[in-house]
Amino acid sequence: MATTPTVVLLPVWGAGHLTPMLEAGSRLLACRGDHVLSLTVLVMPPPSQQQAAEVDAHLLREEAAAAAGHGHAIRFVRLPAVDPPTDHQGPVEFVSRVVRLHLPHVRSALSGLGCRVAAILLDLFCTEMLDVARDLAIPSYIYFTCNAAALSFFLRLPSLCAEVDGEFAAMDGAVDLPGLPPVPSSALPVIVMDRTKPCCDWYAYHGRRFTDANGGVVVNTAADLEPRALAAVAAGRCCAPGVPPPKLYPVGPIISFDSSPSPPPGDECVRWLDAQPAGSVVFLCFGSGGYFTAAQAHAAARGLERSGHRFLWVLRGPPAAPGDRRPTDGDLDELLPDGFLDRTKHRGLVWPTTAPQKAVLAHAAVGGFVTHCGWNSVLEALWHGVPMAAWPRYAEQHLNAFALVADVGAAVAMEVDRDRDNFVEAAELERAVRALVGGEDEEGRKAREKAKEMMAVCRRAVEDGGSSAAALKRLCDDIVFNSKCTVEVKQSS
Ligand SMILES: O=c1ccn([C@@H]2O[C@H](COP(=O)(O)OP(=O)(O)O[C@H]3O[C@H](CO)[C@@H](O)[C@H](O)[C@H]3O)[C@@H](O)[C@H]2O)c(=O)[nH]1
């Protein structure tokens, strides 16, 4: 058996989960520098062809970098394909059930690695794997790709479900989420709003199980970015009575920057920005699952046009098939009002496919970001000090939007109609865009100030001596220490 113990990562395949987890793994190894640990990534084949192609491209880049001697030794172990469930009622149920199908594959992969497993880091939707880790005596950690506010919610949800009869939307008053100002039910994640669907139960299940990770929970946030939510979680105020809080490692922002010398796909967006004045452009982009119907795209186009401001708009179309969540490349003729592109061509660019978001947010021409509030997007914006307008669409994003506005303060709120698939009217987008880059609006001014302040907070956290750098080092030391105490993983028959 090889002597170098390995840290195993088990990410799910979505871009918002896979990329930050791989980056966290690389940074974990880099912070020791003495090659005392190696990295193994167990890859669950993504259920759709499009996602499989994206994941493959990503892994190939990582493998090429490892082969070229950049970074540390990473081994990718591809797990066998499974037949994904077709009778699911939502994404969280779907992902969780696919993960369940992989339980035997993960067990045999861990047993067959041929080296000691120092720790396993599990995506937040992989909590069922905690049983496998326990059986094999492997120290386990949850890698939480969302923020501390969402962690507070996940941990609180099991008791909330017991306290509230019926739908959360029908509740009188706000929800007490420790570490946050009182949360209106309209800011709870869309996923839990229909309690007759299994997604709410799955969320509660994962939240309940986080405390079973005997190593703790690694969170992609920074101590000074969400101090109140982190303190509430650490103090055990979110868990059910008698349940000890998880040990926390706030190691963020973990952002993976493309270090490839060749320009990223979609580089034309960045070149278009080169020709725009500093701080003048509003960037609109909605994550890996955000798409527009024609009605919504028409309203947004009217809002952008009336704002009079410059914009770079990533406009994706609805998924190709019912039940599919992946946006398609936007058919601009179908989605946009007649003549819109022509009328705005001197000040706007509509981009119909994935854009190089990190490079865009880093560009001096960008003065504001209309975002779905996916946590990676938020961290990328804060890293560059870009103020946001919060337009949540799916997953836990409504809670992120609330926390960003009411707690962090780096975003202006937007009126989003949850009953109409998070529709935003033209006038509302126009107002938000003017607030972000217009200069006059008080809410916009505060968001700009806070975004700059949080940029400094985020950068300081990951520098040598910063709180996140220290948490990462602590995590690494704890893994090394624990690995010396664990028994060798037995080869299963
Ligand atoms: O045109 C695009 C669109 C996205 N991205 C990148 O894709 C990632 C998107 O991540 P995120 O902003 O977190 O959004 P989602 O893909 O929607 O992420 C999922 O995972 C996140 C972390 O768990 C959650 O916060 C989200 O709500 C959930 O939907 C970011 O790195 C973006 O830079 C691009 O580069 N170009």
Image: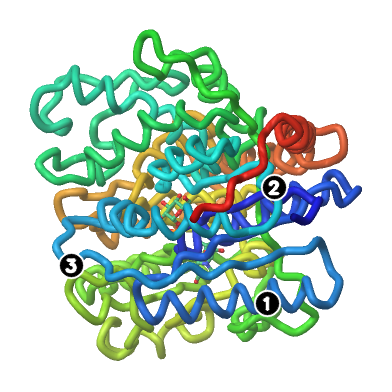
**Compared with residue 117, is residue 163 higher up or lower down, i.e. above or below?**
above
Where residue 122 appears, x then y in whole percent? Answer: 52, 46
Most extreme residue toward the front, as rendered? Answer: 493
- What amino acid is found at the position of numbered circle 1 in the picture? Arg
Number of other residues with Cα within 10 Å of mark 2, as a class: few under 14, some 14 to 19, many 20 or more: many
Mark 2 lies on residue: 116
**Compared with residue 233, is residue 134 higher up or lower down, i.e. above or below?**
below
Q: Separation of disc 3 and disc 2 at Cα?
A: 37 Å
Label located before the other in sequence (1 or 2): 1
Where residue 286 appears, x then y in whole percent? Answer: 42, 63
Mark 1 lies on residue: 61
Determine whether label 1 and label 3 are within 8 Å by CB: no
The residue nearer to you, when weighing 307 against 491, is 491
Mark 3 lies on residue: 86
- Residue 449 quadrant: top right
Residue at 25% across, 87% down: 334
Number of other residues with Cα within 10 Å of mark 1, as a class: few under 14, some 14 to 19, many 20 or more: some
Identify the element where label 3 is drawn: loop
In the rendered image, is residue 438 in sight? Answer: no
Task: Please state which of the two labelled residues, at mark 1 or mark 2, is closer to the viewer.
Answer: 2
Label located before the other in sequence (3 or 2): 3
Where residue 123 appears, x then y in whole percent? Answer: 49, 48
